[in-house]
Image (spheres, rainbow, N blue to C red):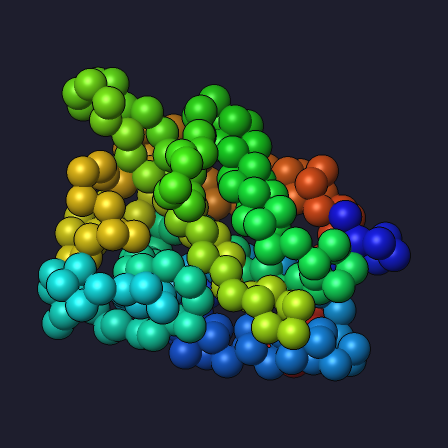
Amino acid sequence: MRADGLPVEWRISDELVAYPAALEAMRARAAAIAEGTAGEQVWLLEHPPLYTAGTSAAPDDLLAPNRFPVYDAGRGGQYTYHGPGQRVVYFMLDLRQRGRDVRCLVQGLEGLVIDTLAAFNIKGERRDGRIGVWVARPDKGPGREDKIAAIGVRVSRWVTFHGIAINVSPTLGHFDGIVPCGITDQGVTSFEDLGQIVSMAEVDGALRAAFERRFGAAKDLAPEALVSAA
């Protein structure tokens, strides 16, 4: 929760957003928050098919370098995939108002995803030493679990950017071009893969409810702001 109780701006993009444009917008907004000229924002969007490399990405984990565009993300973590059917949520939050605790932030984002999954009867779980949210898959073998959400954040001047990616109904075969997050002994899954056919709007509603419980009030982005942000 923010120390001053101010609501967070909640923005949803209905069209696919190019990754370089999103990265530029995130950086600009985070800088403005740090300077005190803009408020916090949570931005929900989808990207065209692409791979991103975090600061710990191993070159050998990019298995199909020519399949989709590859971008340096500047966040922590390794390789990940983004594409249609995946809800990406970028969090531009001011940790000066939220306790200056990055570990607490990451745990809060994991909890946010777990709460969102629970709204659709999916049991998401944390795993020690592995950031993200996992779903046990005993139907695929003993000890098998699949990743349903990736988490990668960066903090600059105590303001966050980047965030989470939840697999709602992406093409799971697109993950085959990378070793997702460096994990070789487990797989990836989605709402659809688990038999939950839901709309992105339904997921967004559950995300917002979970966010407000854990991080505080949110307010819709004003229509005139949407035009200027396009």
Of residue 152 and residue 198, the one placed in the foreground of this image is 152
Of residue 56 and residue 196, the one placed in the foreground of this image is 56
Q: Quadrant of residue 132?
A: top left
Image coordinates for residue 112, horizontal then vertical, percent: 58, 40
Image coordinates for residue 230, horizontal then vertical, percent: 57, 77
Could you tell me which residue is drawn at 31 percent across and 48 percent down?
170
Q: Quadrant of residue 124?
A: top left
Image coordinates for residue 120, horizontal then vertical, percent: 49, 27
Could you tell me which residue is drawn at 22 percent across and 64 percent down?
58
The reply, left or right, for residue 36 in relation to residue 106 is: right
The reply, left or right, for residue 83 in relation to residue 99 is: left
Could you tell me which residue is drawn at 41 percent across and 36 percent down?
128
Asked whether residue 99 is in view, the answer is yes
Could you tell me which residue is drawn at 65 percent across and 74 percent down?
157
Q: Is residue 15 above or below residue 3?
A: below
Image coordinates for residue 140, horizontal then vertical, percent: 18, 23
Asked whether residue 207 is in view, the answer is no
